[in-house]
Image (spheres, rainbow, N blue to C red):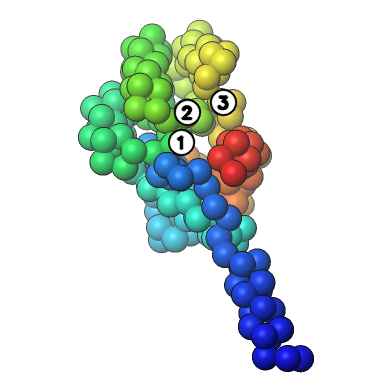
Amino acid sequence: MKPWKNCLAAILLSLLTLPVSMSASAQGILILGDSISAAFGLELERGWVSLLQARLRDQAVALPVVNASVSGDTTAGGLARLPRLLQEHEPDLLIIELGGNDGLRGLAPDKMQQNLSAMVDAAHASGAEVLLLGMRIPPNYGVRYTEAFEQVFRELGDQPDVALVPFVLEGVAGVPQLMQADGIHPNADGQPGILENAWPLISDWLETQL
């Protein structure tokens, strides 16, 4: 092969291996969650958020993922932290994974809904789209409370500008081999299932950014 053809082949190969370009203003994904997204009880790199980062790299998507999750956080805590995070990271997509601790503490569902709605409004005001990862709780507090808790996510997901995963632990929660000894937090084997539950809507959003 002639030298110039070698050079051309090298250029073409380099172009094929470049990361997929996002829009010029793309700032990335911000995840605001609790212990489920903070990889409680695990090394951070084994959590579902790290698996998401790895999948994006494998697909050559040059998009940063910021994990701002804090174990034990509630929707009130997330709402208090969100303005600074939006200002600092200017994300294109905010993934909210909060509410589980509100439920476990028996906090009022209507207050949880107010907090989540305020987070959605703040994200939209900053120019970010929103993906809400829904949660369910054990029936410890009775059917009435459990249904009111789940209704919060359904009503928020009915909004045309909010994407909803109804239950982010679908197929993971309640499966002993996928859960830690506390029966609340997924183990390392359960983390891929969390990603698979969230991935279809994340993938749909990514397609709008290319």
With respect to residue 78, does 28 lie above or below?
A: below
Disc 2 on helix, strand or loop? strand
Residue ID for mark 1 = 93
Give the CA separation, mark 1 to mark 2: 6 Å
Residue 157 appears at what percent x and percent y? 55, 18
Left or right: residue 87 versus residue 163 is: left
Residue ID for mark 3 = 164
Residues marked 1 and 2 touching at CB (< 8 Å):
yes
Sooner in the amino-acid sequence: mark 3 or mark 2? 2
Give the CA separation, mark 3 to mark 2: 9 Å
Residues marked 1 and 3 touching at CB (< 8 Å):
no
Q: Residue at x 35, y 12 (%)?
A: 114
Residue 102 appears at what percent x and percent y? 36, 24
Disc 1 on helix, strand or loop? strand
Residue ID for mark 2 = 130
Question: Label 3 neighbourhood size at 10 Å, few (<14), some (14-19), many (20+)?
Answer: many
In the picture, the quarter occupied by the N terminus is bottom right
Q: Nearer the viewer, residue 76 or 90?
A: 90
Residue 104 appears at what percent x and percent y? 39, 26
Q: Residue at x 47, y 40 (%)?
A: 184
Residue 143 appears at what percent x and percent y? 54, 12
Q: Nearer the viewer, residue 11 or 123?
A: 11
